[in-house]
Image: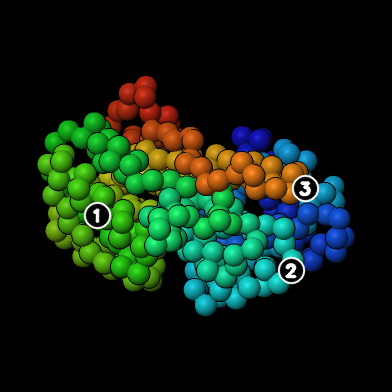
Amino acid sequence: MNLRKYHWAGVILFLMYSCSGGSGNKNVPRVGFLDMLQDETLSQAKKGFFVALKDSGFSPLDSTLEIIYRNAQNDQPTLIQACDYILSQDVDLIATNPTLSTITAIQRTKDVPVFMMVSPRPDIAGLAGKDGSWPANLFGTYETLDYIDTAVMLIHQVMPGVKSLGTIFNQSEPQSMDALKRIETACEKEGIRVEKLPVNSSNETELVVSALLQKKPQVFFALPDNTVFSSMEVIVKTCMTAHVPVFTCEQGLVLRGALAGFGADMYQWGYQTGAQAANYLKTHSTIGLKPEIVKVRRKVYNRQKAMEFGISFDSTFTAVEQSGQ
C-alpha cells in the first residue's frame, strides 16, 4: 500500500510541475500527455506511464524531464484544442490515453511520436491505411478484442446458470461498437442472450441502465468505453439495487465495483508504454520500436462484491479491494 501511495504522490507532483510550465531548458526532454477524461480506471495507466519514465531516469522532480499535461474532460472539441496546445510546445513525444486521444493525436501530427495506452490495435481503432499499414509515428501498447471472449467465458465459470446478459454501448465510439459485436459473438457461443441499449453520454447512464434492467438480465457486462469509464459507480449502484452482478473486461472497473473480470492490468499497461517512451528519450531513435500488444492480463474479483453475492472464486483469480473501502 505504501508503494501505491508513493505512485499517487509522484503523479500529483508531476502534474503540478507541468502546470507551472517547466523550466524551459531545451536540453531537458519534454513529454506531452493527452488525457481524454478524468477517470480512476484510466489514471492507473497514467500512473504506470510516469513511474516507468522515473524508473528510467526521467523525472521533473530532479529536472530531467518536463511534462505538458492536458485533460479534455470528456469533450471532443477540447480534446482537439488540448492536442494542438501540446504539439505547439515542441514536445519530444506525446502520450495518449485512451483511444480517442490516440486517434486525435495521429490525426494532428505525422512527425511527433505518439505513444498510446488503453487503446485497441491500430487497425481496430481505424488507424490503418488503405494498404493495412499502421501510422509510422505510432508506438506504445495496444489490446486486441480477444480478451473479451475470455471475460465472457468467466461468467459461466463463476455463475454456470446464466442465460442472459445486459449491456450498454455508445454508438459514437468505435471501440464500444467493436466490443459490443465481439461480446455478442462470444455470448452466442456460450448460449447467453444479450440485452442491449445505447447510451450517448454519462448523464443518461442511470436512466438507460434502469431501463435495461427491466428486461431482467441475470448479469450486466461493462464494456470498455469512455461512457462506462466515466459513470461506473452509477452503473454499479443501479445494478446492485436490482441485485444484478457486474462483470467486465477491465481490472480497473473491478476495483470500482464490478464483481469480476479479465483484462489488462491498467497500471502495467501504462508502465509498458512508459518503458517504450523512455527508450525513445534515451536513444532519440524509433528504430526497433513498434506498437506492442499488452503483456499483463489478470483474472480478478472484487472481494466485497463476492461476499455480498455469496460467490466463491478459485485460486486462478486474484482478489482486489474495492476503491474507497
The residue under label 3 is: 59
Q: Please say if 117 is above or below 158.
A: below
In the rendered structure, the answer to whether residue 309 lies left or right of residue 67 reads left
User: Real-space Cα distance between discs 1 and 3?
Assistant: 41 Å
Residue at 43% x, 46% y: name it: 143
- Which SS class for mark 3? loop
Query: Where's residue 221, x and y in %?
Result: 28, 50
Query: Where's residue 183, x and y in %?
Result: 25, 49
The residue under label 1 is: 181
Q: Amino acid at mark 1?
A: Lys
Q: Quadrant of the N terminus?
A: top right
Q: Nearer the viewer, residue 281 or 195?
A: 281
Residue at 58% x, 57% y: name it: 137
Q: Please say if 174 is above or below 219.
A: below
The residue under label 2 is: 89
Name the image quarter holding residue 7. Answer: top right
* Residue furthest out toward the top: 315
Q: Please say if 115 is above or below 72.
A: above
Q: Please tell me whether mark 1 or mark 3 is closer to you in this view.
A: 1
The answer to the question of whether label 2 and label 3 lie on touching residues, with beta carbons closer than 8 A, is no
Q: Please tell me whether mark 2 or mark 3 is closer to you in this view.
A: 2
